[in-house]
Amino acid sequence: MDNNNDEIMTISEVAKYLKISEVTTYKFVQEGKIPAFKIGRHWRVKKSDLMEFIEKLKRGERL
């Protein structure tokens, strides 16, 4: 199994990965478009969830 996909990413890391702003990333997370969870006051995203989000975009699914 690819353990790299179980990696936990910060909003900043997700933004860099997608090459979009952190503000836009927060918006997607808060709207539930990118699955995320909170630890204390900080949002985290599983890389595997992010990959699924990207696959949905590639398939042209409405988010």
Image (cartoon, grey):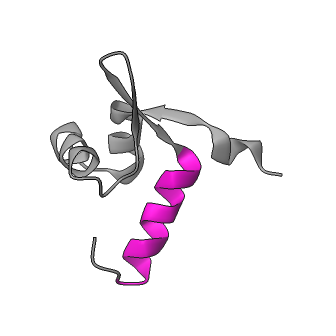
In the image, residue 7 sits, relative to residue 1, either above or below, namely above
Residue 60, image x and y in percent?
A: 35, 84
Q: Residue furthest right?
A: 1
In the image, residue 42 sits, relative to residue 9, either above or below, namely above
> How many tags in the picture?
0
Is 58 inside the magenta-drawn segment?
yes
* Residue sitting at x 35%, y 53%: 34
Which quadrant of the figure has residue 13?
Answer: top left
Residue 24, image x and y in percent?
A: 18, 47
Q: Residue furthest top?
A: 40
**Is 38 left, or right, of 22 in this rendering?**
right
* Residue sitting at x 61%, y 37%: 7
* Residue sitting at x 65%, y 48%: 5
Is 6 inside the magenta-drawn segment?
no
Residue 28, image x and y in percent?
A: 24, 51
Which quadrant of the figure has residue 36?
Answer: top left
Predominant secondary structure, magenta span:
helix
**Is 34 left, or right, of 9 in this rendering?**
left
51 or 38, which lies in front? 38
29 or 12, which lies in front? 29
In the image, residue 45 sits, relative to residue 59, either above or below, namely above
**Is 28 left, or right, of 52 in this rendering?**
left
Image quadrant for the C terminus? bottom left
Q: Which range of residues does the magenta coloring cover?
A: 47-60
